[in-house]
Amino acid sequence: SIFAVKDCGKTLITKTQGQKVASDGLKGRVVEISLGDLNKNEAVSWRKIKLCVEDVQGYNCLTNFHGMDMTRDKLCSLIRKKQSIIEANVDCRTTDGYIVRLFCIAFTRPQENQIKATCYAKSAQIRAIRAKMTTIMTELGTKGDLKSLVKELISAPIGDNIARDASSVFPIKDCFIRKVKVLKKPKFDVTELMEWHNADEKVAGDVGKPVEAEKETKLAGSGGRL
């Protein structure tokens, strides 16, 4: 799987009774877990990952990516006086048919050796930065499948790339993909879901050697009646 921890928690359900099947009650449940717990890394504990239960196998619920968010305290720690907030959002379709909405947030910062206390950007500059944000996010969302997108969102510093590109317009800081929503999903496919969970598992060590078929030897008189 994408995350370091596969077994991330438990959920309650009433046992199957008559027509009411337990697995039907579990399917579609959305669980919200901190990325710090999923990847055993406290530095990213401000990221919240939403996972949706799509299939039940025995006592295991198989989940799929459903969304991503930021904790409120992290977001509030970024907002300050005397600077501009720049926000942008974009809808994009991944190669495997998911429609995802990405939200980006960034803040202006003072230039080097600036004496003025404030660092507000003009509306035209904000529009230019927003345009750069949307192009980078669209490119990110459409270039691969959902799995590669989630890996990029978790590990790669997309915010830094946007900040670097936008610095030609106005210097910005604290650029993050604030939120991700999965708007539409393709038809449910078990094999695709299993790929999410089994992709990183190693192939069995001893798979044997290819065997050549023996050549048939003709018997004397095998052409006619025996």
Image: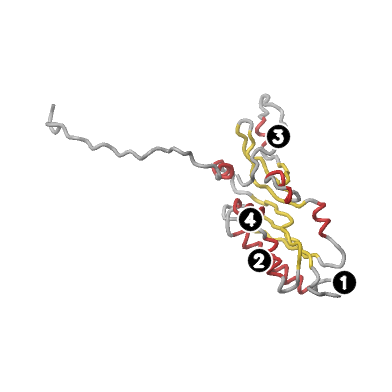
First in residue order: circle 3 vs circle 2: 3
Badge 4 amino acid:
Glu
Relative image position of residue 224 (x, y in whole percent): 12, 31
Relative image position of residue 19 (x, y in whole percent): 66, 27
Relative image position of residue 94 (x, y in whole percent): 60, 55
Mark 1 surroundings: few (<14), some (14-19) or many (≥20) residues within 10 A: few
Residue 117 — which label?
A: 1
Q: In this view, does 58 lie above or below 181?
A: above
Mark 3 surroundings: few (<14), some (14-19) or many (≥20) residues within 10 A: few
Examine the image and state in which quarter residue 77 appears. Answer: bottom right
Distance from the alpha carbon under mark 4 to that under mark 2: 16 Å
Quarter of the image with the N terminus is top right
* Element at label 2: helix
State the residue lying farthest toward the front: 113
Q: Label 3 belongs to which residue?
A: 10
Relative image position of residue 215 (x, y in whole percent): 23, 37
First in residue order: circle 4 vs circle 3: 3
Badge 2 amino acid:
Thr
First in residue order: circle 4 vs circle 2: 2
First in residue order: circle 3 vs circle 1: 3
Badge 3 amino acid:
Lys
4 vs 2, front mark:
4
1 vs 2, front mark:
1
Residue at 78 percent of width and 50 percent of height? 71
Q: Is residue 193 above or below residue 100?
A: above
* Element at label 4: helix
Q: Label 2 belongs to which residue?
A: 135
> Is there CB contact under 8 Å for labels 4 and 1?
no
